[in-house]
C-alpha cells in the first residue's frame, strides 16, 4: 500500500520502519525534506526504501496518509496541504495535542473530530494514540495482549486501517472499534492517565488491556 | 474500621455491601435518611448491619469518609457538612462528574483536586473511578487481573485506602499509586474512554490492565 506519513519525529519514524518491514511503499513528509541533518537521522529508513518529500509530495503519494505531527500543528499543516489534495484518502490520525504542562490542546473535544470536521471528504480514523512509538510497532514487546482502539465514521477506512495495524503486529483480537470519530475523545483524553502511569512506573513502554467479565 | 459513605446510589450501596462483608462498621449518608422507599431499597444492607443517617451523622461516624455522590453535587454536599466536620478524616473519593451528554463537569482539572483544595485539612484519595460499581467490589469477576489506581498527596491516607481496596478483593499487585492528587485528572478523564469501551462492548463490567514490557 502507498503510505504517506506527515511528521518525522519518533512516531513518524517508528511507523515508517514498521510498515516498510511489512512491504509497504512509504514517503515521509517533512517541511524540510532536503535538510542534511534530517537525512542523516533518517539514514536507516532511507536504506530500507523509505523516501522523504515535502508534505504535498507525501500526500500525493498516499492511499493512506498518516498524521504524526504534534497535535497543535496538525490542522495548520493539513490546511497548507489543502482539502483538495486530501480528498478521498484515508487519514490515519495518531496525534494527540498533549502539551508540556500536561494539558490537552483540545480539552473539550478531540483533534480527530476537528480534523474530520475540517476535511469532510477525507475519512479520518483515530488509532494508536494510547501507546508510545515503541509499542505502536512492537505490541509483542509487551508481557501479554493489550488493546488498541479505532474511532472513525467510515467503515471501509477503518477496515483499511485495521489491516495496517495487523501489519504492525497487532492481532485482530486486540483491535477494538469504538465507533464514530466522536469516540476519538476517549482515546485522546486517555493521554492524562497515560502520562500518570508512565511517570508512576518510570516507563512509557506499556499497553492497556480491556479485561472483560470472566466467561464473557 | 468506621466508614461513612455519602451517596446511596449504585456505587454507595455496592461499597457498603463490600465493606460490610469485610467486617467494617458502616453508616450510609443520605439527605433523606428516613425515606420509607429508600429504607425498603436498602433492606439487605440494613440486615447486614449497615446503618443509615444524614450526611453529618455518616461523617461524624467515619474514620474514612467515601464520596459516592454525583460529581456535580459533591462539593456542595461536602460544604454543607462543613470543613470542620471533615477535618482529619480520610476522604476516599470515587466520584466522577460525568454528564449525560458524555462531557465532564471538570474538563480542565479534576473533582478530586477541587475537593482537596476546598478541604485542605482532609486528605483526599481518588480511586475506584475507572470501573463500575459491580467491578469495584468484585474484581475477581473479571477474566484476569486488572489495575486500580490511587491518587493523593498523603501517604498514610493512601495506605489506609489501599487496605480498604484489598478488603474489596483487589490484590496488592493490582494497585498502582499514580502520585499526588493532581494525577486524579487522568483517572477521571478516563471516563470518556470508559464510556466508549462500554458502548462498543455492550458491557460496563470490565477493567483495564496496565500491561508492562515483557521481562520488566
Image (spheres, coloured by chain):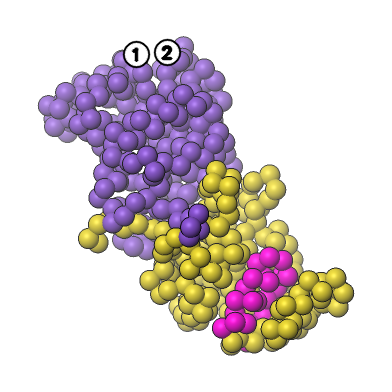
Chain colours: A purple, B yellow
- Stretch of the chain drawn in magenta: B2-22
B52, above or below A13, in the image: below
The reply to whether callout 1 and callout 2 are in contact (CB within 8 Å) is: yes
Instruction: Reply yes or no: does residue B3 show up in magenta.
Output: yes
Instruction: Name the chain under label 2.
Output: A
Residue A158 forms part of the magenta stretch: no
Residue under pointer 1? A60
Q: Which mark is residue A85?
A: 2
Question: Whole-percent x and y of residue A58?
Answer: 31, 19
Near mark 1 (Cα within 10 A), the count class, few <14, some 14-19 or many ≥20, is: some
x and y, in percent, of residue A69 in the image = 37, 32
x 41%, y 58%: residue: B209
Q: Chain of mark 1?
A: A
B185, above or below A185, in the image = below
Query: Mark 1 vs mark 2: which is more N-terminal?
Result: 1
Q: Say if residue A13 shows up in the picture.
A: no
Q: Is residue A133 left or right of residue B44?
A: left
Residue B210 placement: quadrant: bottom left
Q: Residue furthest top?
A: A84
Nearest the viewer among A94 and B167 is B167
Is residue B178 shown above or below A18? below
Residue at position x 42%, y 13% from top?
A85
- Of helix, strand and loop, which one carries label 1? helix
Q: Residue at x 62, y 59 (%)?
A: B96
Residue at 31 percent across and 15 percent down: it is A61
Residue B42 seen anywhere in this rendered image of the structure: yes
**In the rendering, at what x and y percent does residue A14 appear?**
26, 37
C-alpha separation, residue under disc 1 versus residue under disc 2: 7 Å
Quarter of the image holding residue B178? bottom left
Amino acid at each position: 500500500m502507498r503510505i504517506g506519513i506527515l511528521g518525522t519525529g519518533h512516531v513518524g519514524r517508528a511507523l515508517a520502519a514498521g510498515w516498510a518491514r511489512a512491504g509497504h511503499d512509504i514517503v515521509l513528509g517533512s517541511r524540510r525534506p532536503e535538510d542534511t541533518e534530517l537525512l542523516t537521522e533518517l539514514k536507516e529508513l532511507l536504506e530500507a526504501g523509505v523516501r522523504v518529500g515535502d508534505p504535498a509530495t507525501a500526500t500525493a503519494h498516499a492511499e493512506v496518509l498518516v498524521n504524526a505531527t504534534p497535535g497543535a500543528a496538525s490542522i495548520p499543516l493539513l490546511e497548507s496541504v489543502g482539502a483538495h489534495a486530501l480528498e478521498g484518502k484515508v487519514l490515519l490520525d495518531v496525534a494527540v495535542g498533549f502539551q508540556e504542562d500536561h494539558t490537552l490542546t483540545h480539552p473539550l473535544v478531540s483533534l480527530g473530530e476537528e480534523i474530520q470536521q475540517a476535511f469532510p471528504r477525507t475519512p479520518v480514523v483515530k488509532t494508536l494514540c494510547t501507546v508510545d512509538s515503541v509499542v505502536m510497532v512492537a505490541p509483542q514487546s509487551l508481557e501479554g495482549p493489550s488493546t488498541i482502539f479505532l474511532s472513525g465514521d467510515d467503515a471501509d477506512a477503518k477496515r483499511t486501517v485495521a489491516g495496517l495495524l495487523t501489519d504492525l503486529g497487532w492481532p485482530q483480537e486486540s483491535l477494538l472499534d469504538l465507533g464514530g470519530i466522536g469516540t476519538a475523545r476517549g482515546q485522546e483524553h486517555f493521554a492524562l492517565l497515560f502520562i500518570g502511569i508512565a511517570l508512576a512506573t518510570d516507563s512509557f513502554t506499556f499497553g492497556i488491556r480491556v479485561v472483560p467479565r470472566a466467561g464473557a
